[in-house]
Image (cartoon, grey):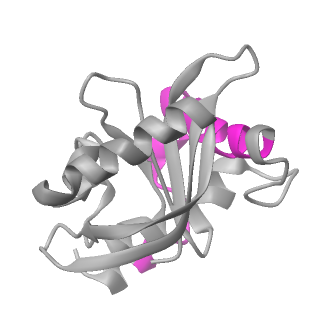
């Protein structure tokens, strides 16, 4: 899917992201960012799914599976990764980095697991079409609920 097509989708939130099984974890992306970093990721008081979807910066999130799978990518992220939500959601997040860079990515995620978040990451990612692009500075954080349970990790960056 081309960048214009992805950005054309940026108007209304994808229906799949509105489903309760998706909307809760997506809202947790914004809630946990504010909880861990002490500042809002998007405007407070509105629909967090809509606000994250339309944010002018990329936001991605994956779960806690043994090989974590993306469950969210906003319009800016989908444009950067040159794919649509159907291609992105369910993809192992490790595939967002080329094989030689996956160890570096894993070290970053291990740091986030230990520290709760980092705000100094920069690296190279690869789009669905094989285009390499730089991200950074990126913020990466744990998706922590109010009870302290971790539901995955998320990142935001300017593509």
- Residue 95 in percent (x, y) is at 19, 51
- Residue 65 in percent (x, y) is at 32, 23
Q: Main secondary structure of the magenta part?
A: helix
Q: Is residue 77 magenta?
A: no
> Is 99 in front, or is 93?
99
Q: How many marks?
A: 0
- Residue 35 in percent (x, y) is at 79, 38
Report the side of 23 relative to 4 (left or right).
Answer: right
Q: Is residue 87 visible?
A: no
Report the side of 43 relative to 137 (left or right).
Answer: right
Q: Quadrant of residue 106?
A: top left
> Is 90 in front, or is 146?
146
Q: Please, is residue 116 above or below residue 44 in the view?
A: above
- Which quadrant of the rendered structure holds the N terminus? bottom left
Q: Quadrant of residue 87?
A: bottom left
Q: Residue at 82% across / 60% down in the picture? A: 43
Q: Please, is residue 102 above or below residue 77 in the view?
A: above
- Residue 159 in percent (x, y) is at 45, 78
Q: Residue at 70% across / 49% down in the picture? A: 48
Q: Please, is residue 146 above or below residue 6 in the view?
A: above
> Is 16 in front, or is 111?
111
> Is 82 in front, or is 92?
92
Q: Residue at 51% across / 46% down in the picture? A: 154
- Range of residues picked out in magenta: 7-34
Report the side of 104 relative to 101 (left or right).
Answer: right
Q: Is residue 104 visible?
A: yes
């Amino acid at each position: 899917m081309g960048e214009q097509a992805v950005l054309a989708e940026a108007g209304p939130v994808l229906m799949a992201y509105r489903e309760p099984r998706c909307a809760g974890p997506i809202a947790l992306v914004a809630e946990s960012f504010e909880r861990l970093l002490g500042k809002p990721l998007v405007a407070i008081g509105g629909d967090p799914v809509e606000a994250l979807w339309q944010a002018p910066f990329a936001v991605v999130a994956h779960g806690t599976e043994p090989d974590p799978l993306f469950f969210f990518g906003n319009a800016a992220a989908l444009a950067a990764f040159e794919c649509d939500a159907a291609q992105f959601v369910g993809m192992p997040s490790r595939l967002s980095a080329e094989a030689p860079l996956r160890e570096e990515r894993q070290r970053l995620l291990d740091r986030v697991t230990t520290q709760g978040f980092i705000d100094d990451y920069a690296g190279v990612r690869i789009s669905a079409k094989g285009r390499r692009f730089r991200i950074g500075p990126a913020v990466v954080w744990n998706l922590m609920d109010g009870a302290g349970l971790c539901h995955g990790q998320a990142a935001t960056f300017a593509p």
